[in-house]
Image (cartoon, grey):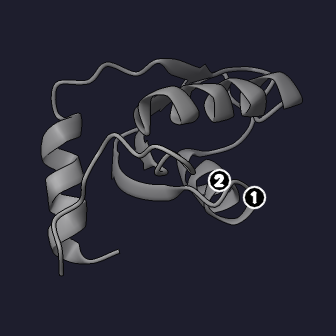
Amino acid sequence: MTGKQKKYLRTMAHSLKPIVNLGKHGLSTETKNEIDAQILEHELIKLKVLDSSPISHKECADFLRQENRLEVVQIIGKTLTLYSPHPEEPKIELPSV
């Protein structure tokens, strides 16, 4: 993903509120399923890592990059902006390179 594409996604995500919270159970199966469901529906989401989470926001970002094939667009504080295009019908059209 190019810098121009990430900037475009950051602009789109500016007005979004976190729709998934990562709490004391960390990246449990239920949390991963919720992230997958939300990313499939919206393509671009924000995830908030709460203070009670056993893992840091950086650990969470690294794990999600590897396991879920998500693109971590931005990290501000403990809020991660995640992107993954819909496999069949993408809603967000990224600018060309």
Q: Mark 2, residues whose alpha carbon is within 10 Å: few (<14), some, or many (≥20)?
A: some
**Residue tagged 2:** 64
Which disc, if any, is residue 46? none
Q: Relative to residue 45, is residue 55 drawn left or right?
A: right
> Mark 1 touching mark 2, by CB under 8 A?
yes
Snapshot quadrant of residue 43: top left
Q: Mark 1, residues whose alpha carbon is within 10 Å: few (<14), some, or many (≥20)?
A: few
Snapshot quadrant of residue 46: top left
**x, y percentage for residue 65?**
61, 62
- CA gap between label 1 and label 2 equals 5 Å
For the view shown, which residue lies furthest in the right direction? 29
**Residue tagged 1:** 67
Kind of residue at badge 2:
Leu
Kind of residue at badge 1:
Glu
Question: Who is closer to the viewer here, 77 or 72?
Answer: 72
| Quadrant (top left/top right/bottom left/bottom right) for the C terminus | bottom left
Label 1 SS: helix
Q: Is residue 54 above or below residue 94?
A: above
Q: Is residue 43 above or below residue 74?
A: above
Q: Relative to residue 50, is residue 68 drawn left or right?
A: right
Question: Who is closer to the viewer here, 25 or 52?
Answer: 25
**x, y percentage for residue 53?**
68, 29
Q: Relative to residue 11, is residue 53 drawn left or right?
A: right
Label 2 SS: helix
Snapshot quadrant of residue 34: top right
